[in-house]
Image (spheres, helix red, strand yellow):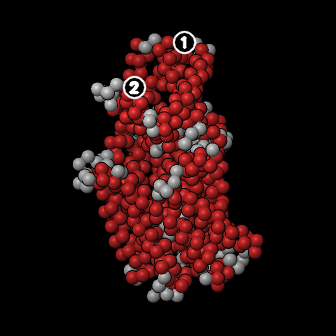
Amino acid sequence: MSERAQWGSRTGFILAAAGSAVGLGNIWKFPYITGTNGGGWFVLIYLACILLVGLPILAAEIMIGRAAQAQPVVAFERLKGKPTGWSIIGWMGVIGAFLILSFYIVVAGWSMDYTVKHLVDFGKPIREQAVAESRVYEATTSTESMRDSLISARADRIAGPRVDAIEAQVAPSIWKLNAEFETAMATTADSDVPEDVRRGRLLQDLEVQAAVTRVKTLSADMETARENAKDTATQEFASLDDSAVRQQGTDQFRRRLIGDRMGALFGGLASDGWTSTFWAAIFMFLTIAIVATGIGRGIESACKVLMPLLIVMTVGMVVFASTLPGFAEGLSFVFKPDASALKPSGVLEALGHAFFTLSLGMGALITYGSYQKRGTPLFGQAVWIAGLDTGIALLACMMMFPIVFSFGQDPGSGPGLVFISMPLAFAEMGSGGILLGAVFFFLLTVAALTSAISLLEVAASYFIDRWNWSRPRAAVSIGIVIFGLGTLVAFSMSEGFFLASWAPGFGMSLFDTFDFVASNWLLPLGGLLIAVYAGWFLPRKFRDAELASHSKASVGAWLLLIRFVAPAMVLLVLAQKIGLYDANELLYSIWN
C-alpha cells in the first residue's frame, strides 16, 4: 500500500478544515435563521453552543482521524484492531455525503447561475419595468392612499414581535386545538345544523373549550397590539410632508414589484430541472477535478486560494455595507439581544446549526484529520477552525442585514433572503449592483465549493482506503454517482417529475427528503456516537498520545464536555428534530 498522503502544512490543514465547515450554511442559512429567531440572543446562544458542543466534537473527530490515519469506516476498525460496530459512524458519514452533496450541488448551481445573471445585469429589465409601473402608481394614487400603505407596512413590522410574544404565552397545542375548532366551524358553515348547535357540540370537549376561551382572550390582546402598532406608525408618518410620503410610497411600491418578480424568477429556476442540472454539472466537475488531483496539490492548494479569497470578499462586502444607511440597524439586529423574540425551539435551532455548520457527524473532519501527522497540538487547531467558521458566519450577517434594512426588506424572510431579497437590493442599486451582486453570489459559490470538496472526499476516501482505488478513479466514479442523484434532486421540483408520487407520499420533495434525512437523522446521530466513542470508548493510549501536549486542565475540560455536556445537548437536538418532543410545548409545560 502506498504511503498515506499528508497535508503540506498546518496552515493548509486549518484552511481546508475551515473550508469544509464554511459553506452555504454560513452565508445562506445562518443569516436567515438569525433573522427568524430574533437576532442578538440567537447569536449569543449559537456562540455558546459552538463552545460547549461544536469545539469538543470537532476536536474529537480530528483526533480519531489522526490516530487511525484512515477515513471514517476504516478508522474505527483500525483503532479497535478488528471489525467493530462503531464503523456505523463512518457508514453514516459516507451515506450522508452522498445525500448532502446531491442537493448541495443544486443550490451551489443556483449561486453560479445568479453570479452570471448579475454580470449581465439581469435585474435591469425588471428594475426598468418596475420603475415604469411605479410612475403610473405615482400619477394615479393619492397621497393619503400612499400614507395609508406606508402606515400599514410599518405597523406590520412593529406588531410582528409583539404578536409573537403574545402567542408564546400559551403552549402550541392550545393554538392547534383552537385552529381545529375554527376549521371545523368554517367547514360546516353551509350545514343545516345551526351555528350555536355546532359550536356547542364541539365545545363539549373541555380541552377544546379551554383552548378556545384562552385564544379568544389572546386574540383580543393581539388586536390591541396591532392597533397600538398602527397608532405608532401613524405618528411616525404624520410628521412627513406630502413629497416625502409620495417618495417613500413610490419606493415601497417599486420594491414590492421587484420582489414579486425576483421571487417568480427564482421559483422558475428552482423548478427548471434542465437549467439546475446544467449548473450542477459545472459545479460537480470543479469539485471532482480538485479532489482527483490529490490532498496537497488538489484540496490544500485550492483551499489556500479559495479561503483567503472568501474572507477578502466577505470583508469587502461588509465595508460596503458600512456605507449604507441601514448599517447601524443591521448591527443592532444581529448583536442586540431581544429575549422576547427567541422561542425555546430557537435555542435548539442554534444548537443544531452550530453542529451542522462545523461539518460535524458526517466524517469530513475525521477524513481530513487522517491526512495530518500526529503530534500537532489539537485544541489550538480546533479553535482556529471553529473561529474561522463562526467569524465568517457573523461577517455574513454584517454584510447582508444592512443591505436588507437599507432597501426595506424583511430580515426574517427565510430562505428567500439570499435568492430574492438580496437580488432585489442589488437591482435597486442600479449599475453598482451589477458588480456587488456578482461578487456576493461568487462568494456564495466559493463557500459551497470548499464544503463540497470535503463531502466528496469523505465518500471517495472510503474506496481509496478500503478497496485501494486510485484517487482519480474514486473521485470521478463517486462524483458521477452523486451527480446522478443530484439530477433527480434538480428535477424533483419540476412539473412532470417522473417520481410523481414522491411528494404526496413523503409529504416533501426529494430535495427536502434528502435534506431531512441527513440533517435530522444522520448528522446528529453521527455526532452523538462520535462524542460517546471519543469520551468513553477510544482506547486510552490513542487519546493520551493525541493530547500529550495539552495541560491536564484543558484535557479535563474537554473530557467533561465530550462525555456529558455534548452528548446530552446533541440528544436534545436529535429528539426534537425527529419529533419526539416539541421544545416550545415542553418548556411551556415546565414553566407553567
Q: Secondary structure at mark 1?
A: helix
Residue visible at 36% across and 75% down in the picture: 473
x and y percent of residue 573 in the render? Answer: 54, 58
Q: Nearer the viewer, mark 2 or mark 1?
A: 2
Nearest to the observer: residue 38 or residue 98: 38
Q: Which mark is residue 242?
A: 1
Q: Label 2 amino acid?
A: Asp
Quadrant occupied by the C terminus: top right
Q: Is residue 333 left or right of residue 483?
A: right
Residue visible at 47% across and 85% down in the picture: 83
Q: Is residue 263 left or right of residue 248?
A: left
Give how far apart the Cα atoms at labels 2 and 1 are.
50 Å
Please indicate, yes or no, whether residue 254 appears anywhere in the rendered image. Answer: yes
Instruction: Identify the mark nearer the N-term, 2 or 1.
Output: 2
Please indicate, yes or no, whether residue 435 appears anywhere in the rendered image. Answer: no
Quadrant occupied by the N terminus: bottom left
x and y percent of residue 164 in the render? Answer: 56, 36
x and y percent of residue 101 in the render? Answer: 41, 61
Residue visible at 31% across and 58% down in the picture: 487
Residue 333: which quarter of the image?
top right
Q: Label 1 amino acid?
A: Asp
Depicted 507 relative to depicted 401: above or below = below
Residue bearing mark 2? 196
Residue visible at 59% across and 45% down in the picture: 588
